[in-house]
Image: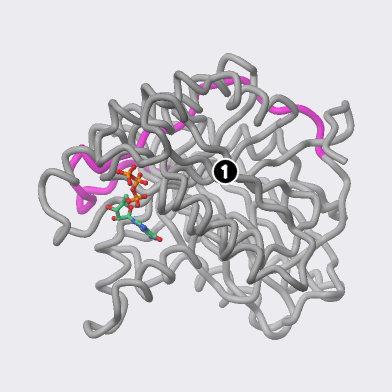
């Protein structure tokens, strides 16, 4: 049941446009979190039908529900936004009551959109405005188009990004180009998209796990909100440890994903390090992992929030989630148009005490701050 009360947070993962819908189809069927809500919003009815069919096919053995919402039924008539964000914005505004009802009970929305087309680039900001008005926090995952998709899409994407970064509490960016450089040159386009979707999925799952698990040392949603509110670049990643002795390696692995050009946490103002373990880790190894973290941060000013959760269902010994924010902008980072601003909206409410879940592979993503 989806209710909001003082002791429970309602997390809702929402895909906007084609890319968002594809990501949600994959996520909803693979998610280990039965309490999380998944929805897709689109101006294109055939894309929504495809999402639902895909989700249904993939989740026959799962109970996860994937809701779909057609926006602009009377404006675009279900035919999509034709790569025009203004058309999509208009469609979303026409369907504002539908969107309001969709997120009415949410505490946190995690929005996923591919930028460069119409719906994801235009409707996302309307949804974010609504969330802001309704006091719902919003974390955004967006993809930037491949260079090969042309300058026009790039221009649309950056314009949308500027808007999204002002409106979301936090925005994490995945560059499709950065992803492809890490893959084999012969990779197929659909496989490359899937790869990107998998990255997002793992990060989203990991964050949800952290926010819905009851840890021995708990990281709650207010800790998360606090860390995300810090200005600057942000690094986020997950590493896997196969034994107590490799906790430090998992930490460094989380921050050394080849998909990302600049992947340090030097000078970060705040970091969450969440350790999920099959069984109790040794104090010595836990401490040496935190000592390694201090070395990587190389600053005494950082706020470090560490959590520990025991999760017997993990397929490996442990996983380490790192979210570091307020990192001074990197001289080697991309042009300012690719930078993403963080959040400036109110804190979230109380954590929900749910069960622990897991990821199975390390991953990493960069979030750029205004800089
Ligand atoms: N990672 C990833 N990126 C995608 C996927 N589908 C599309 N994209 C990217 O997202 C951008 C926007 O595409 P869509 O999401 O299909 O477009 P839309 O927002 O629905 O826009 P309209 O169809 O014009 O309404 C594209 O330019 C691609 O770069 C996907 O499945 N995964």
Residue 131 placement, left or right of 325 = right
Against 172, residue 363 (above or below) is below
Residue density around tag 1, few if under 14, some if 14–19, many if 20 or more, within 10 Å: many
Name the foreground residue: 203 vs 309: 203
| Residue 362 locus on image (x, y percent) | 55, 72
Q: Residue 332 in the image: x percent, y percent?
A: 20, 53
Q: Is residue 328 magenta?
A: yes
* Main secondary-structure element of the magenta-colored stretch: loop
Residue at the image position 59 percent from the left and 54 percent from the top? 204
**Location of residue 251 in the rendering, given as x and y in whole percent from the top left corner:** 57, 68
Quarter of the N terminus within the rendering: top right
Q: Look at the image and say whether residue 335 sits in the magenta stretch.
A: yes
| Rendering coords of residue 212 (x, y %) | 79, 49
Q: Residue at x 57, y 65 (%)?
A: 54
Region rendered in magenta = 327-351
Q: Residue at x 46, y 65 (%)?
A: 255
Relative placement, left or right, of 68 versus 152 is right
Q: Along the horizontal axis of the image, is 306 left or right of 296? A: right
**Disc 1: which residue:** 14
């Amino acid at each position: 049941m989806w209710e909001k009360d003082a002791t429970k947070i309602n997390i809702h993962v929402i895909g906007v446009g084609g890319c968002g819908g594809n990501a949600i189809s994959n996520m909803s069927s693979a998610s280990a979190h039965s309490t999380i809500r998944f929805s897709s919003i689109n101006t294109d009815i055939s894309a929504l039908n495809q999402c639902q069919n895909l989700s249904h096919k993939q989740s026959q053995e799962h109970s996860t529900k994937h809701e779909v919402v057609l926006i602009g039924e009377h404006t675009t008539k279900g035919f999509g936004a034709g790569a025009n964000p203004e058309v999509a914005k208009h469609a979303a505004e026409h369907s504002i009551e539908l969107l309001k009802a969709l997120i009415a009970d949410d505490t946190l929305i995690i929005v996923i959109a591919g930028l460069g087309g119409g719906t994801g680039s235009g409707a996302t900001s309307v949804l974010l405005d609504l969330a802001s008005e309704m006091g719902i926090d919003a974390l955004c995952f967006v993809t930037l188009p491949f260079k090969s998709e042309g300058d026009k899409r790039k221009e649309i994407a950056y314009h949308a990004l500027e808007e999204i970064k002002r409106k979301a509490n936090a925005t994490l960016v995945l560059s499709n180009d950065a992803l492809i450089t890490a893959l084999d040159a012969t990779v197929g386009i659909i496989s490359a998209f899937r790869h990107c979707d998998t990255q997002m999925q793992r990060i989203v799952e990991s964050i949800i796990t952290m926010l819905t698990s009851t840890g021995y040392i708990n990281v709650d949603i207010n800790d998360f909100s606090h860390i995300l509110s810090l200005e600057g670049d942000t690094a986020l990643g997950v590493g896997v440890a196969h034994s107590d002795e490799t906790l430090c390696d998992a930490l460094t692995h989380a921050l050394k994903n080849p998909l990302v050009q600049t992947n340090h946490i030097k000078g970060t103002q705040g970091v969450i390090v969440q350790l999920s373990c099959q069984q109790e880790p040794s104090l010595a190894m836990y401490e040496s992992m935190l000592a390694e973290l201090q070395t990587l941060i190389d600053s005494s000013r950082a706020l470090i929030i560490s959590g520990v959760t025991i999760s017997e269902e993990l397929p490996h010994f442990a996983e380490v989630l790192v979210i570091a924010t307020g990192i001074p902008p990197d001289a080697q980072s991309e042009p300012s148009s690719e930078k993403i601003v963080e959040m400036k909206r109110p804190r979230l409410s109380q954590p929900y005490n749910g069960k622990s879940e897991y990821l199975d592979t390390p991953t990493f993503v960069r979030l750029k701050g205004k800089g």
